Amino acid sequence: MSPAKTPAEILDIDGHEVRVTSPDRVVFAEPGLTKLDLVRYYLAVAEGALRGAGGRPMVLKRFSKGLDQEPFFQKRVPENHPAFIDTATLRYASGTSAEETVIRDAAGLAWVVNLGCLDLNPHPVRAEDLDHPDELRVDLDPMPGVDWSQIVDVAFIARDVLHDHGLVGWPKTSGSRGLHILVRLRPEWNFADVRLASETLAREVENRAPGLATARWWKEERGESVFVDFNQNAKDRTVASAYSVRALPDARVSTPLTWDEVRSRRPDEFTVLTVPERFATLGDPHAGIDDAAGSLDALLALAKELGPAEKPPRGSDGSGRRVSTMPLIEVARTKTKPEALEALETWKQRHPDATSALHPADVLVDGMRGSSSLWYRVRVNLQHVPDAERPAQEGLIADYDPWAGRSPS
């Protein structure tokens, strides 16, 4: 963050002293929101935000250089954290471990916001039991060209699948283009079980709504559909929790909804400026979520009925890599999204005829997780371009290496 231009603001929050540095630094220029405004926002919705993120280890997603720069992801809790911040040590399949931040009160919310965190990214486990998730997360991720009504249709189908298998879904806006549905579980199943149950749910949603929804993991195979992203339930994944502020110019908020609101409300209605009044007036639509913990038995039984999901073919060159069923070309690898979009425009200018044949979902700009931040990969699916007019794979317009200079530790 930029050097402080004004003295720090010292807040007394339920007996805990929290220091907010550079309190008048503008974080969101469009609505004119300062860092202190964001702290006050989280204090206004603390009960709901802690229902989603409290007591869970979280990855700190820090926008230390502002919204126009990529955030970095900090798994390990800062060394000089105050006594009211708890920790929990997570161990990953790679053999690494990290002592991560656990917040339990409003002071903890203010403290992580002061670090430059906008959204809260907790794991689906409680600090007291790190091996058994108590939350299954349904992430409805629309492909380009998909409108809100299609996302809503898929959400209600997902709700029905959950209900048919003894589970309750709690919807919220993602704070971007999609919807999340949270499902509380009794903490009796491991991560592999929860991910399998989530994948099974996604497959059943696709079975009930072919063309509207997809469970296909590989992006180029989804078409203009809503991807039911089951892999958000993998052990190393986190998602923005309820009442998280997202890094969009209007300071949009990932907001819990009632099912009656899902069709009529839109994500851009919910911002840092509007949500506190909604919360004060209506309370938290997810207030009953902890009383609705369910069982995965029925979804896991369905997984056995459906059998293993179809796997993509592997190459014959001994690498074991997946072979895409689509005519993909790679355009660029970049450090930032603006650079990725610039490279894409360069490619389009080189190949105007092919560009004119593309559908919205044929352009694939993906944020890829690096060691501590995102990088971007740009690909084009030529499935709608006639064979004779398909451009060949060329040298990458940009070839950023996110691991350059790093030791393989």
Image: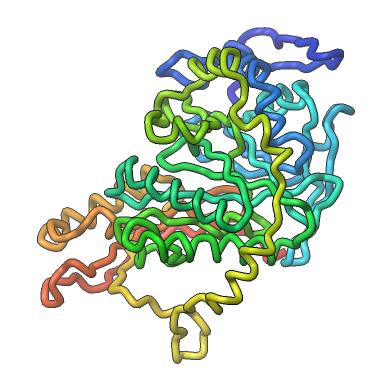
In the image, residue 331 lies at what x, y percent? 32, 62
On the question of residue 111 being in view, the answer is: yes
Quick one: quadrant of the N terminus? Answer: top right
Q: Nearer the viewer, residue 14 or 213?
A: 213
Q: Nearer the viewer, residue 389 or 256?
A: 256
Left or right position of 57 against 232: right
154 up-or-down from 26: above or below: below
**Display coloring:** rainbow
360 up-or-down from 27: above or below: below
Q: Residue at x 82, y 14 (%)?
A: 14
On the question of residue 118 being in view, the answer is: no
Q: Residue at x 63, y 70 (%)?
A: 301
250 up-or-down from 296: above or below: above
In the image, residue 228 lies at what x, y percent? 47, 56
Residue 384 falls in image quadrant: bottom left
Quick one: quadrant of the C terminus? Answer: bottom right
Q: Which residue is situated farthest in the right direction here?
A: 83
Left or right position of 318 against 195: left
Q: Residue at x 55, y 65 (%)?
A: 200
In the image, residue 373 lies at what x, y percent? 57, 48
Left or right position of 151 against 100: left
Residue 332 falls in image quadrant: bottom left
Residue 196 falls in image quadrant: bottom right
